[in-house]
């Protein structure tokens, strides 16, 4: 099983990825937040910084492009190949944002299957001379899961390296439950299709993975986003499940407890704080003004705080903080005074 970190715009840029990789190694692929091509322009400074090799050492990074124009996709792909050495590009057909969908991008492109097929034909032909690989991250449709049957017929026609499926339609955003029936359609043909299949959606703890794996035991990869932001050690916990519950080979009995002793849980809280401090200090080095860094930290702890018991009053203090000093006091208090949630991994 391979483990991927989903891109979340504004949060999982290179500064976050670098810290996560240092403190929680084990992610097979990090997907960079999407690039939207600008007419006659190459990458912005922010986009260049996000994909440049020196900012992503030791990690496998897959850049993601979001567009419905094949010439724009190919132009940015060539830049990523020639200037930065990337050999695989991911097409974003999953973003459900209304502003994106209104422009027929992201999951909005799924409502135009004929144009999507023409787009994929042109893109696959265009990247072939460079021996570049193309993967696709998609939802199961825009308005109805019934669309997925026809979308799969399109995807089967092309030499995709991987199909990453979030089994919700666009208008559901992240509400409700993933549609396993629709995902089963992709799973049933994954052994004869050219692409590998990756599942994405609502994996927040090891037991979520276990339910998924029982349904789809031949799955080759899972992609996690919000779950990893809330719990950076989620991939570690899932690997415990994969190993039959054993944290190491010396143990004779399965142990699916999240923490095997008090000191392990305390060490994990320290690791969370250290990771946060690295992210904060790295942002301070590149952003001008404390407010911009503070906004970034608030975005981050909107997720990270949720893995602690009784986190709400600490999160309120974080939201109200007007300085990094006050924000750090609230984070430090949370990491010292509260524990991480208890559950079987």
Image: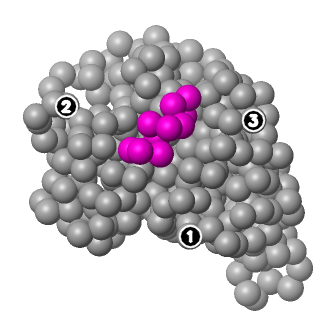
Classified by dominant secondary structure, the portion drawn in magenta counts as helix
234 or 341, nearer to the observer: 234
The numbered disc on residue 276 is: none
Name the element at disc 2: loop
Name the element at disc 1: loop
Left or right, 59 with respect to 2, comes to: left
Left or right, 47 with respect to 205, comes to: left
Residue, disc 3: 146
Which numbered disc flags the more N-terminal residue, 1 or 2? 2
Q: Quadrant of residue 53?
A: bottom left
Q: Mark 1 or mark 2: which is in front?
A: 1
Residue, disc 2: 38
Real-space Cα separation, disc 1 to disc 2, in angstroms: 31 Å
Q: Residues within 10 Å of mark 2 (few under 14, many from 20)?
A: few
Segment colored magenta? 110-119
Real-space Cα separation, disc 1 to disc 3, in angstroms: 23 Å
Left or right, 27 with respect to 186, comes to: left
Q: Residues within 10 Å of mark 1 (few under 14, many from 20)?
A: some
Report the residue at 86% width, 63% height from top. Answer: 214
Compared to residue 57, the image places residue 250 above or below, namely: below
Q: Quadrant of residue 309?
A: top right
Q: Quadrant of residue 30?
A: bottom left
Which numbered disc flags the more N-terminal residue, 3 or 2? 2
Residue, disc 1: 194
- The answer to whether mark 1 and mark 2 are in CB contact below 8 A is no
**Residue 70 drawn at (x, y percent):** 30, 43
């Amino acid at each position: 099983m391979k483990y991927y970190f989903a891109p979340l715009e504004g949060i999982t840029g290179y500064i976050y990825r670098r810290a996560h990789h240092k403190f929680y190694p084990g992610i097979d692929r990090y997907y960079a937040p999407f690039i939207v091509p600008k007419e006659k322009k190459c990458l912005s400074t922010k986009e260049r910084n996000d994909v440049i090799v020196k900012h992503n050492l030791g990690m496998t990074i897959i850049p993601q492009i979001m567009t419905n124009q094949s010439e724009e996709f190919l132009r940015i792909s060539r830049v990523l190949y020639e200037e930065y050495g990337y050999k695989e590009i991911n097409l974003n057909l999953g973003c459900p944002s209304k502003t994106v969908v209104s422009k027929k991008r992201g999951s909005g492109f799924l409502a135009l299957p004929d144009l999507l097929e023409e787009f994929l034909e042109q893109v696959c032909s265009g990247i072939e001379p460079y021996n570049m690989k193309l993967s696709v991250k998609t939802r199961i449709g825009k308005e109805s899961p019934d669309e997925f049957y026809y979308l799969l017929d399109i995807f089967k026609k092309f030499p995709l390296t991987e199909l990453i499926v979030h089994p919700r339609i666009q208008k559901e955003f992240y509400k409700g439950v993933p549609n396993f029936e629709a995902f089963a359609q992709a799973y049933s043909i994954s052994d004869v299709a050219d692409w590998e299949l990756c599942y994405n959606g609502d994996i927040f703890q090891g037991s979520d993975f276990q339910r998924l794996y029982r349904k789809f035991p031949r799955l080759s990869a899972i992609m996690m986003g919000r779950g990893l932001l809330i719990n950076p050690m989620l991939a570690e916990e899932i690997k415990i499940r994969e190993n039959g519950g054993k944290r190491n080979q010396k143990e004779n009995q399965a142990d699916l407890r999240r923490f095997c002793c008090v000191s392990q849980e305390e060490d994990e809280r320290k690791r969370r704080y250290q990771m946060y401090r690295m992210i904060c200090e790295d942002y301070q080095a590149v952003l001008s003004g404390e407010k911009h860094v503070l906004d970034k930290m608030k975005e981050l702890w909107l997720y990270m705080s949720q893995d602690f018991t009784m986190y709400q009053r600490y999160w309120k203090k974080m939201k109200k903080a007007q300085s990094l000093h006050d924000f750090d006091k609230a984070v430090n208090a949370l990491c010292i005074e509260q524990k991480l949630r208890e559950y079987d991994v």
